[in-house]
Amino acid sequence: MTTTPPTNEMAASLKRDGFGDDEIANMLGPDVEQQPVQLRWGLDDVQWGDDDSATVMLSGPDGEPYWLELDQERAAVLRQNLAGPDGEETHVVADDLATL
């Protein structure tokens, strides 16, 4: 009797059912390669702390909340990356979006 290795679909299904990564690995074994969770973020989803840290608010495929806490150094890199190739920080407010 041969068995087929578990698929990514099985791991994804278990993830949607609320199982954690360790639980899924224990159930399916080490041969399963899990797909990363697709996360989204939007305008005003970055909170800057008084100590120059940052918290990025994210949501998963089913709207489940995630967040990423960045220390000062990583927050500075995020700020640089978001500034774009010209290095100028852009600030968009809701009123500006109405005119686009």
Image: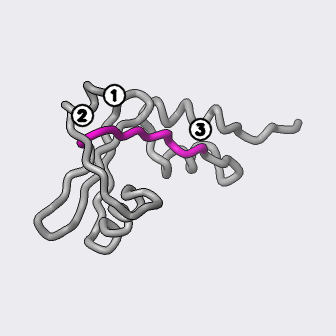
Image point 76% across, 41% down: which residue?
Answer: 5
Image point 45% across, 30% down: which residue?
Answer: 17
- Give the dominant element type of the magenta stretch: helix, strand or loop: loop
Task: For label 2, count other residues whose C-alpha is less than 10 Å away and answer few (under 14), some (14-19) or many (20+).
Answer: few
Image point 80% across, 37% down: which residue?
Answer: 4
Q: Amino acid at mark 2?
A: Asp
Does residue 36 belong to the magenta stretch?
Answer: yes
Asked if residue 88 is positioned above or below residue 58 in the image, the reply reads: below
How far, Cα to Cα, is label 2 from label 3?
43 Å
Q: Which residue is mark 3?
A: 11
Dot placed on the residue nearer the N-terminal end, 1 or 3: 3
Q: Amino acid at mark 3?
A: Ala
The residue closer to the viewer here, 92 or 40, is 92
Does residue 85 belong to the magenta stretch?
Answer: no
Q: Secondary structure at mark 3?
A: helix
Instruction: Provide the residue span drawn in magenta.
Output: 35-44
The residue closer to the viewer here, 66 or 2, is 66
Q: Amino acid at mark 1?
A: Leu
Looking at the figure, which quarter contains the N terminus? top right
How far, Cα to Cα, is label 1 from label 2?
7 Å
How far, Cα to Cα, is label 1 from label 3?
42 Å
What number is the disc on residue 100? 1
Give the left or right position of residue 3, taking residue 39 as reference: right
Asked if residue 14 is positioned above or below residue 28 in the image, the reply reads: above
Q: Are marks 1 and 2 in contact (CB under 8 Å)?
A: yes
Give the left or right position of residue 12, taking residue 46 as reference: right
Asked if residue 71 is positioned above or below residue 92 in the image, the reply reads: below
Q: Which residue is mark 2?
A: 96
Looking at the figure, which quarter contains the C terminus? top left
